[in-house]
Amino acid sequence: MNKIVVRKANSNDYEAICRLLQQLDELHIELYPEIFQRIAGPPREYDQVLKWIENPDSEIIIVETEFQKVVAVMKLIIENSPQYANFKQEKYLLIDEIVVDDAYRSKGTGSLLIDEARDWAEQRNLNHIELNVYDRNKGSLKFYEKLGFETLKRRMKLDF
């Protein structure tokens, strides 16, 4: 990959963000058609994306090429541990959504985003990073494990 830029998203990036989130949504539909469905309109509403961009406890990070093409998106949210007495009270970073354009996978873009997330968390004195990944998403599971992520818990479902 040639020269790339990692930066905070702004409202002008909305269409590019949606284009990439559409790829993520399509993957979820493919892996879990019993849960996900196609929708008419954009994958995320403009007002919601704007809230993530403007909220001090969240951020959307994008990666763009030297030609200003957005090729990756990551949504970060500061979370608090559950408010139960037996949980240590801490703040941590949740990578809520992350997607790299199909054409830019296996080129270091995902690792670059995770490094950016780590820096973002460290700058805010957060204790660790968590993310959610669906069990059938084997490629992403392998990628995250390669970077040192470990399974923290499992959320299971019973159909009837």
Image: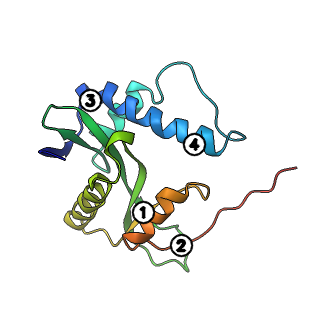
Say which amino acid is labelled 3.
Asp
Nearer-N-terminus badge (4/2): 4
Query: Dot 4 lies on which element?
Result: helix
Say which amino acid is labelled 2.
Leu
Q: Which mark is residue 28?
A: 4
Mark 2: few, some, or many residues within 10 Å (few <14, many ≥20)? Answer: few
C-alpha separation, residue under disc 4 versus residue under disc 3: 23 Å
Q: Image height check: is 113 above or below 99? A: below
Foreground disc of the pair 1, 2: 1
Residue at the far right: name it.
160
Foreground disc of the pair 4, 2: 4
Q: Which mark is residue 143?
A: 1
C-alpha separation, residue under disc 1 versus residue under disc 2: 16 Å
Q: Do labels 1 and 3 touch, CB within 8 Å?
A: no
C-alpha separation, residue under disc 4 versus residue under disc 2: 21 Å
User: Residue at horizontal 39%, vertical 41%?
Assistant: 102
C-alpha separation, residue under disc 1 versus residue under disc 3: 26 Å
Mark 1: few, some, or many residues within 10 Å (few <14, many ≥20)? Answer: some
Give the x, y percent position of residue 7: 18, 44
